[in-house]
Amino acid sequence: GINNPGNFAIGDTLFTGNAKVAFPGIPSFSPEKFAYIRNPNPSTYKSFQKGIDQLLAEGAVQALRQRNDDGGGPLILAAVGQLQFEVVQARLENEYGVESVLEPMGYTMARWADGGWDAVDKADKDGKLFGIMIVQDRWKRPVLLFRNDWKAASVAAEEKYLELLPWSRPPSFDE
């Protein structure tokens, strides 16, 4: 095996040739559970951050942040099921010796806005995203969090320029 210093992700390929090689990426599935996670004990900040970084690198959960947040704001964990959150908390405690507090959010689905930030800004300015949380994924791409299927379907049908997708596309070769 290979020791991963945090540079590799699921789907990465190691190649020793001179030519660039790219394979189709692996999409991430749409999460249905969302929660803020925080460290209740500031004295364990470094261990908490190290644990979170490692678990995110392993793909235990997805991370979302407020738009333009480069890491200083609240971290939102996104998962397909509640068990993923429980695994993250247990591993933080058992492997990194830190406590964590999860604050569940009232959203039940994520949609990636493949139309980009300009499309999201237009829909938001036009009042079409009321009650929808606008966040970004780890590649700073727009993600909309919805409270129910009806609202997501309604926005997708009425604002086609958003190009809503139920999963995140793999990052392009250049990202």
Image (cartoon, rainbow, N blue to C red):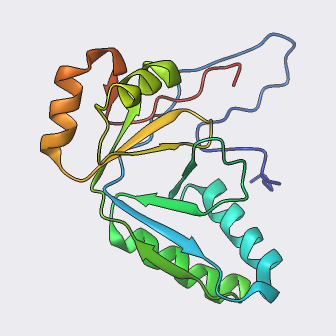
Relative image position of residue 75 (x, y in whole percent): 59, 62
Pinpoint residue 107: horizontal percent, then vertical percent.
Answer: 30, 57
- Judging depth in this view, the residue of 170 and 107 nearest the camera is 107
Q: Would you identify the image quadrant in which residue 71 lies?
A: bottom right
Residue 114 visible to an observer of this rendering: no
The residue lying furthest to the top in this view is 19
Please report the residue visible at 24 percent of the width from the left and 53 percent of the height from the top: 147
What residue appears at the point 28 percent right and 31 percent down from the top-left corner? 128
What is the number of callouts on the image?
0
Quadrant for the C terminus in the image: top right
User: Which residue is drawn at the image coordinates 60% and 63% (left, top)?
Assistant: 74
The quadrant of the rendering that contains the N terminus is bottom right
- For residue 68, side relative to residue 157 (left or right): right
Of residue 68 and residue 84, the one placed in the foreground of this image is 68
Q: Position of residue 12 (x, y in %)?
A: 66, 35
Q: Does 132 appear above or below 157?
A: below
Query: Which quadrant holds residue 22?
Result: top right
Q: Is residue 161 above or below residue 98?
A: above
Q: Residue furthest left?
A: 150
| Residue 112 seen by the camera | yes
Does residue 25 appear to the left or right of 124 in the view shown?
right
- Residue at left offset 37%, top offset 73%: 83
**The one of 84 and 137 positioned closer to us in this rendering:** 137
Query: In the image shown, does 144 or 125 lie closer to the viewer?
Result: 125
Q: Position of residue 169 (x, y in %)?
A: 47, 28
